Amino acid sequence: MRLTLRIWRQAGPEARGDMVTYEVPDASEDMSFLELLDVLNERLIAAGEEPVAFDHDCREGICGACGMVINGVAHGPQRATTTCQLHLRQFSDGDVIDVEPWRAAAFPVVRDLVVDRSALDRIVQAGGYVTVPTGSAPEAHSVPVPKAAADEAFDAATCIGCGACVAACPNGSAMLFTAAKTTHLGLLPQGAVEQDRRVPAMVAAHDAEGFGGCSNTGECTAVCPKGIPLGAIGRLNADLLGALRRTRGTGRD
Amino acid sequence: MSTPSNTSTTRRDTAGQGTAGAPGGYTVGAPLTDTAAPDGPLETRWERRRLAARLINPANRRRLPVIVVGTGLAGASAAATLAELGHPVLSFCYQDSPRRAHSIAAQGGINAAKNYRGDGDSVRRLFLDTVKGGDFRSRESNVHRLAEVSTQIIDQCVAQGVPFARDYGGLLDTRSFGGAQVSRTFYARGQTGQQLLLGAYQAMSRQVAAGRVVTHPRTEMLDLVVHEGRARGVVVRDLVTGEVRTHLAEAVVLATGGYGNVYHLSTNARGCNATAIWRAHRRGALFANPCFTQIHPTCIPVSGEHQSKLTLMSESLRNDGRVWVPLRKGDTRAPGDIPEAERDYYLERMYPSFGNLVPRDIASRAAKRVCDEGRGVGPGGLGVYLDFAGAIARLGRRAVEEKYGNLFEMYQRITGEDPYRVPMRIYPAIHYTMGGLWVDYDLQSTIPGLFVIGEANFSDHGANRLGASALMQGLADGYFVLPTTLTHYLAAGPFEPVAADAPAVVEAEAAVRARLERLLGNDGSRSAESFHRELGRLLWDACGMERDEAGLRAALERIPELREEFWRDVRVPGSGEALNQALEKAGRVADFLELAELMCLDALHRAESCGGHFRVESQSEDGEALRHDEYFSYVAAWEFTGVGAPPVLHREALAYETVTPSRRSYA
């Protein structure tokens, strides 16, 4: 199949960017979208041009490294699919495809399609963990976890931190990401203990990083490759209010 | 036992010494006799090692920084635990976040001898299965420790909030994996690696918040600083700014994963590479059993030239999926049109007690054999069916969805076929490397102060790794073993401070800069990728699932030529002062081109079949792998002497005190 790509090229964070057009006349529908870029890049290198920079690694839809806006949609047209798992059979011969980086205030462009998502790490550092030293854990069966809670926690824990939710949100909010983290830990007895401290701290870090607030648009969950439900944000809000109520005036931070 | 075909070790050694410099040449050095393992009863060795280890008081730990390279299960768990003990930890990874390390992609599960099922499991049995699974090429002491620690790993991960699968009573669920007849694999749907890694990453994040871990993402280690005989630092390149700089510490831990990407196509993430361990090897760390490569039997077959990676389908699928090919050669009917009587469920036929759950090397080789016979399915005949029709009829579609849904979806996305309707097509692919830097029982390499953990070392899996054991080893090393053994090492300090302008630092930095400049300044015409593809094909043919002497010798002729072509003709566009993914790639391919030669040499010298290593010259009458314990019951640890120069072989004899090596049978 013949495809025309219009790709955002930007040499560095301060440089001006531009859409540049490339033709790939011999793409195969069995290729993944990233393999299409590989083929293009090899040709660019052979021609002495600089290849298109993009983040990618596992190419199995789990590491969360890849991510680009394809024809205006984060990770492209197929629902619940990362860019690396998007195959060209989703496109038609002769298509013109726009490829752009995640755009959000909290994700500065590094180069071309690569953005800096370290803000998500800093949200986790604010409290997205269970405080348990190594070697002192109780016997695993000493705390049973209801299957429903374990399954729901797991569903939230499948977030891959790709940032598509941020890219899709008109407010550039990372609330779906933050909610996935707090939901995962808050639903398990092991993580519930710290929830009243965790949730306000992670929300504060989220805001401090320059992510916008949630206005329930729902674009985040529509593009999420792991199908994290919007209900997670509802749970986050409830946890936040509960935490603020319970800790008010107690002297706890 | 029969003698190995015309290539006895004695002759090979003589040939090696006599033909130093010729392809396949090497010399023999002193054997490795000190593995630092305690002696005495196997069951109490680890306990005695822990009791004998020196301690450091918390106030002093603050003055002893440690470098940890890599943030997968081994690296993240080590960084978290060392920091919790009080050490300042410098953590490095090439990804944009530590959470993206390739451990995240492990699907199936993690083994532990909890015996929650009451099916007869025990530490002893996990130990025995692992030693047997490794085809009697692993160390008893290490494997026993791994089995012991396994139970604590599950406790630790549960306490961290890892959402393992549970049954309706709220207790942990388990499933079975290849090479075991008990159900000891703990799992989190098909994303166990992800959940365990997030647990370790979160534990590390807690230490970042506490100010004890400083992370350096998008940073690649390009050399090791060895000062007065000790590993004291790393030279790294910031992949965004291109800045080359040195970080110094009291000790260096490499947790940089395996080198399966040397084959170009593998199940590894695209960024996985050998550079950190290969640079350390060039600085004096011995490289052990480089040819021991695990082939995973259940991967999605290659679809075309454009292919950039192979995707694994969890081995746990074989709990319910049945593997078959048509009975008759060249049968091109659709799978649904082939009646039961004309199918060959070859694993169930050949290995009735383990059936579809034979270990990975056995299943891979059997698949290759039926495809070589012309009975393979799909494009090019390189595939076998993994069929869930029976499971769907027996359990219902919903139950199958619940267990394997995400894997089925992934398969459909990649192939465009619906595995609920037609059987999956699978074929073996390069997955995991059991070889790696040689370490002793303390996980210390031959360079004092350089510790190597997880897949980057060679230590625990022998010639073949059982499924669900990699996650176990990574976390055992990082959470439980290293904190004891590294502390013991550091307690012997303090070591001489290293000045920022010490000769070792200046020289290592200069070497890194020179190499980068050489790559950037080369006026070539080919991409590094094209060299990588060529090397990978060469290596898969000569040193893949099946190897023979002629093929290995031919590869040993060709690889140095290819390396020479690379340095003459590679083209790396762009500059070194910015994000330059072509430069990153070229540097890694350059190292693969050196490592590949050592792999072929190791495969050539080991004239026996064992584990994932099948030498055509060494097989039983019925085509099974044939080991030669009297010649090869050792670890081959290679010393670097220069690019293209004959390396030195140091042998570590494997002593089996509690297990009697036997012909592996899964029938």
Image (cartoon, rainbow, N blue to C red):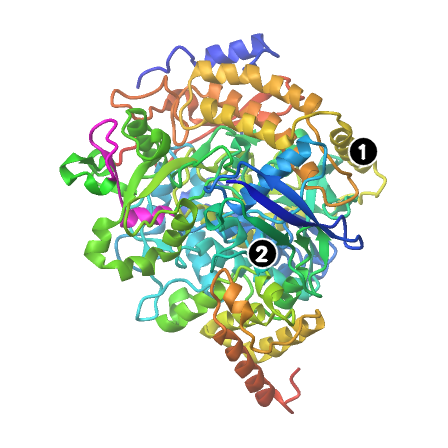
Q: What segment carries the magenta color?
A: B314-334
* Left or right, residue B328 beside residue B444: left
Residue drawn at (40%, 41%) of the image = B300
Q: Disc number at residue A71?
A: 2
Which residue is farthest bottom? A249
The residue nearer to you, when weighing A53 against B9, is A53
Q: Residues within 10 Å of mark 1 (few under 14, many from 20)?
A: some
The residue nearer to you, when weighing B212 against A174, is A174
* Left or right, residue B647 beside residue B410: right
Q: Which secondary structure lies at badge 1?
A: helix
Is B603 rendered above or below residue B264? above
Residue B317 at x, y percent in the picture: 33, 49
Residue drawn at (27%, 29%) of the image = B375
Disc 2 residue type (three-letter): Asn
* Quadrant in which the C terminus of chain B appears: top left
User: Is residue A9 visible to the viewer in this orientation of the structure?
Assistant: yes
Residue where numbered disc 1 is placed: B510
Which residue is farthest right? B501
Chain of the residue under label 2: A
- Magenta-colored stretch includes residue B320: yes
- Magenta-colored stretch includes residue B306: no
